[in-house]
Amino acid sequence: MKPIDFTYRFDPSQPIAKEPETADEAQRILEAGNRLFARWTDSCLRDSGDTTGPNSFIVPCTPSDLGMPTPEGLATKQAPFAALLGCSDARVPAEIIFGQVRNNMFVVRVAGNVLTDEALGSIEYALHHLKDSMRLIVVLGHTGCGAVSATVDTYLNPWNYLANAPSRALRSIVDQLMAPVRKSADAVRSVWGPNASDMPGYREVLIETAVFVNVVQAAYNLRLEQEQAGRTNVKVVYGVFDLLTHRIWTAPPDDSKATIREVVLARAPTSLEEFEELSVRVALRMARRVGKAAIARKEGPHA
Ligand SMILES: [Zn+2]
């Protein structure tokens, strides 16, 4: 396997782009960053047997991005252009998967990316005190989320509530994830019918649907908060990071051949009806994708 580089590079001869002035511009920067990151990991995988030439992921930056003091000897002023609510999962480091540098993102990470009062308070701090640079709020979930999986297992077998979440603090996370899990179970039932829980792959479909529904719900709530606060210049978007492809999706891909072009963040729903419709659409795609694979696994290889 050849060397793989992840590099932060300051090149005085190549000035980097200025900070985004609009929410759409900020969104495009993050989408492009993840697209590049995913393409880099693709190339590392593809060339893993090749021992020539580096596989490099280069993130351009300025000296202040790396923490150098100002000419006056002061610390750099905090100036993120996006706030992010994400899961604490160690495999989903926000700045890396979006190809960003220090001081670009105000990151709040909590297991299951639940929108607790403290998480909301942190985001509001950024919006209030860093409003000159803040343009975007991102809610980011990820496939195979452990907190969502534990909540689904509790939903499927309530007797395991105390075993799955043995402390009050853990139960607080499971309790907050239960609403999106129940919503997802309803959505899966509307797709597969009343006997949905008997279908092969049901647990997996429920987990991955709940991952999406959870981020959409948090994005919807954050959008309402912005509306109520009268903030019109900050946009709320959401996405789900796929641990296998390293891409961020706003709806599960129908198959693994989905292209890099599909890396996008979606705007938060504007109504409960839209949230409802989206939940069912996600359940349908998950049921098709995961359910088909589960049926194939159960039937085994055909002669
Ligand atoms: Zn997680």
Image (tube, helix red, strand yellow):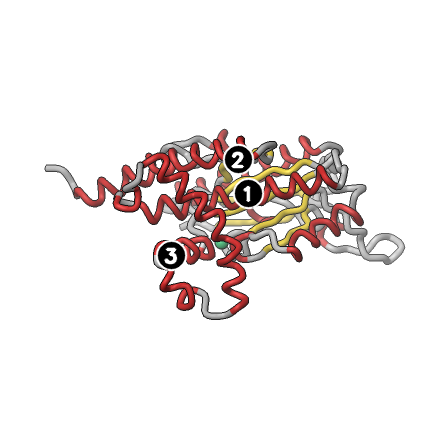
Q: Amino acid at mark 1?
A: Gln
Q: Is mark 2 within 8 Å of ligand 1?
A: no
Question: Which residue is the extreme one toward the left?
Answer: 303
Compare marks 1 and 2 and give the one earlier in the sequence. Answer: 1
Question: Which residue is the extreme one toward the right?
Answer: 72
| Distance (Cα) linking label 1 and label 3 | 20 Å
Question: Mark 1 sits on what residue?
Answer: 217
Identify the secondary structure beneath mark 3.
Answer: helix
Cβ atoms at labels 1 and 2 below 8 Å apart: yes
* Residue under the point 67% across and 31% down: 24
Q: State left or right for residue 19 relative to residue 178.
A: right
Q: Amino acid at mark 2?
A: Phe
| Distance (Cα) linking label 2 and label 3 | 24 Å
Question: Mark 3 sits on what residue?
Answer: 153
Q: Amino acid at mark 3?
A: Asp
Residue 212: x %, y % from top left: 48, 42
Label 2 packing within 10 angstroms: few (<14), some (14-19), many (20+): some
Question: Mark 2 sits on what residue?
Answer: 275
Residue 112: x %, y % from top left: 52, 54
Q: State left or right for residue 28 relative to residue 294.
A: right
